[in-house]
Image: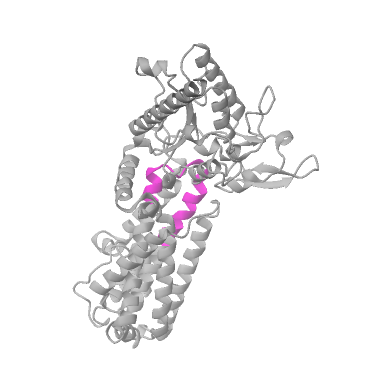
């Protein structure tokens, strides 16, 4: 017998992405921060947006420093030093903010990459976003190296010599590059103008790469919550005041510095070219870059669910699916019939989340058709099949004389649910009818009313945590539909006391079981109160 496509599953048992030990460790860390900051203000859940905000902070502070920078061999070091010592209250703080925000930017990029890797968010429809994020690593590193070069102190001297020796190992380069940094006569003011041009130009290319990186996301989040913004700025400012960035002695090409401190966020490869060889460092970094970029096509191949399909005879061109799609996979085009518009799905962009089916006005189970066909749907999990399974299960439970069950619609990326009755009283009270969905946002709100009208005691919608929705907007759209803030609405006539929305992460399966049990007890109290009212009315 073919298993139901709506059978509730545990993400780890189903082998869904993000179910490994690394992902569990990342989630555990995030939940610790949730307890401290609150989920909505947890910086670990806003790493992408935090990267954008740090970029703008680095840009603003860099623009201030540029006003006072002298692009000459003789004046480069002294102009930066004057900012730190003669204008410490403004220029010095700006310089320190520029330095620490740059380090934080590198750290956030690395953390964002590791988080997305842990959750398996790089395969199938996400390949483009993952692949376009790889160049930002090199562009950010190049921006930082050029910034250290501009200070023209002993660290800048080491940076210049090391970088040119590193590039000298590539075909087409040679020892002539290094000579520019070992003799005073070879240095010129024009070279520092070039460095300034590069230090402005490379970040602009980086910004373009960041813009390309988010092009397949609808409503990309590029601004953090107010609390994260203020805390980030406050911590960086306090760090700037407590440990202001200082220059080393001015570069002197007549001698080689014995030792210099290294910023491991940006300059880590440079000591490695002396500990090993420039060629080996190139080989390692190039290999890592290719490996990271090729990850979407490496390892165990997880079958991709079929993309959403549009039924032209049932699509009225309302644009709800177009507006709700988290990945801009839906566009509107003229309807083949010549009347109005029709939704068109880009299969390469489609996440197969089903959110579009949940937004379609034709996906209502109350349509008087033998077979329910939605305007847009998932081929392997049609809402018509869900209506048939739900109706048949409710009829069977009631025909067997069992109590009214609780219907649970659970996101299969969330906690999952074990629907097996565990006790006799569970059986007598009807137990729980559980249905799994690829995303809670796939459920049209009318299914809640349909379940209640056909004998369910109550309905529970189990979603991922709001800030960790696998498909970005599934939880938000579900909540807004239930609260009559987003079409399609759950009608006002539905008894909200019999509807419960529960957020539960993958590791919260036991907690979800407890929440459902508590909800059933509340429903029992409601039934008892209703019977008492009927008795009093009869008396």
Instruction: Give the main secondary structure of the magenta stretch.
Output: helix
Q: Is residue 126 magenta?
A: yes
In x, y percent, where is residue 341?
A: 74, 45
Query: 63 above or below 488?
Result: below
In x, y percent, where is residue 383?
A: 59, 30
- What residue appears at the point 37 percent right and 32 percent down from the top-left corner? 515
- What residue appears at the point 37 percent right and 36 percent down from the top-left corner? 506
In x, y percent, where is residue 96?
A: 31, 74
- What residue appears at the point 53 percent right and 57 percent down from the top-left corner? 212
Horizontal arrangement in the rendering, residue 490 relative to residue 106 (left or right): right
Horizontal arrangement in the rendering, residue 270 relative to residue 193 (left or right): left
Query: 269 above or below 186?
Result: above
State which quadrant residue 273 falls in: bottom left
Q: Is residue 124 magenta?
A: yes
State which quadrant residue 368 falls in: top right
Residue lying at the far front of the rendered structure: 539
Residue lying at the far top of the rendered structure: 400
Magenta range: 113-139
- What residue appears at the point 45 percent right and 46 percent down from the top-left corner? 294
Asked if residue 304 shows in the view, the reply is yes
The residue closer to the viewer here, 70 or 420, is: 420
The residue closer to the viewer here, 223 or 216, is: 223
Horizontal arrangement in the rendering, residue 264 relative to residue 223 (left or right): left
């Amino acid at each position: 017998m073919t298993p139901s496509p709506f059978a509730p599953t545990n993400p780890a048992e189903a082998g869904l992405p993000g179910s490994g030990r690394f992902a569990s460790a990342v989630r555990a860390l995030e939940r610790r921060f949730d307890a401290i900051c609150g989920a909505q203000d947890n910086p670990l859940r806003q790493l992408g947006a935090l990267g954008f905000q740090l970029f703008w902070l680095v840009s603003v502070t860099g623009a201030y420093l540029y006003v006072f920078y002298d692009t000459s061999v003789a004046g480069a070091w002294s102009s930066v030093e004057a900012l730190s010592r003669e204008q410490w209250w403004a220029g010095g703080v700006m310089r320190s903010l520029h330095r620490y925000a740059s380090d934080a930017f590198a750290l956030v990029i690395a953390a964002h990459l590791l988080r997305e890797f842990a959750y398996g968010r790089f395969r199938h429809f996400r390949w483009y976003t993952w692949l376009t994020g790889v160049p930002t690593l090199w562009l950010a590193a190049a921006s930082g190296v050029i910034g250290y070069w501009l200070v023209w102190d002993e660290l800048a001297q080491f940076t210049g010599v090391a970088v040119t020796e590193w590039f000298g190992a590539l075909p087409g380069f040679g020892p002539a590059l290094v000579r520019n940094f070992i003799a005073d006569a070879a240095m010129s003011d024009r070279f520092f103008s070039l460095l300034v041009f590069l230090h402005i130009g490379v970040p602009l290319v980086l910004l373009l790469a960041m813009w390309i990186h988010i092009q397949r996301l609808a409503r990309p989040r590029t601004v953090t919550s107010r609390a994260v913004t203020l805390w980030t700025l406050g911590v960086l400012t306090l760090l700037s005041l407590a440990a202001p960035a200082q220059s080393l002695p001015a570069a002197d090409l007549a001698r080689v510095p014995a030792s210099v401190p290294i910023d491991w966020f940006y300059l880590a490869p440079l000591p490695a070219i002396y500990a090993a060889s420039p060629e080996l460092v190139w080989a390692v970094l190039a290999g890592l870059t290719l490996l990271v970029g090729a990850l979407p096509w490496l390892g165990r191949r997880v079958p991709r669910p079929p993309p959403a399909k549009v039924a032209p005879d049932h699509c009225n061109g309302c644009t709800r699916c177009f507006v709700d799609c988290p990945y801009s996979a839906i566009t509107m085009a003229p309807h083949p019939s010549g009347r109005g518009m029709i939704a068109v799905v880009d299969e390469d962009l489609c996440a197969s989340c089903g959110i579009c089916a949940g937004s379609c006005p034709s996906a209502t189970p109350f349509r008087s058709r033998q077979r329910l066909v939605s305007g847009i749907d998932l081929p392997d999990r049609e809402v018509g099949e869900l209506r048939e399974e739900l109706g048949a299960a409710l009829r069977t439970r009631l025909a067997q004389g069992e109590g009214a069950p609780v219907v649970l619609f659970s996101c299969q990326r969330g906690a999952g649910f074990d629907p097996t009755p565990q006790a006799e009283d569970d059986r007598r009270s009807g137990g729980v009818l559980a249905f799994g969905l690829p995303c809670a946002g796939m459920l049209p709100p009318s299914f809640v009313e349909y379940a209640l009208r056909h004998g369910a005691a109550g309905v529970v919608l189990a979603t991922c945590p709001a800030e960790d929705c696998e498909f970005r907007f599934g939880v938000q759209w579900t909540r807004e539909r239930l609260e009559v803030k987003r079409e399609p609405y759950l009608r006002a006539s539905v008894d909200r006391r019999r509807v419960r929305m529960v957020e539960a992460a993958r590791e919260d399966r036991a907690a979800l079981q407890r929440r459902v049990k508590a909800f059933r007890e509340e429903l029992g109290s409601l039934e008892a109160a209703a019977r008492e009212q009927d008795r009093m009315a009869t008396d």
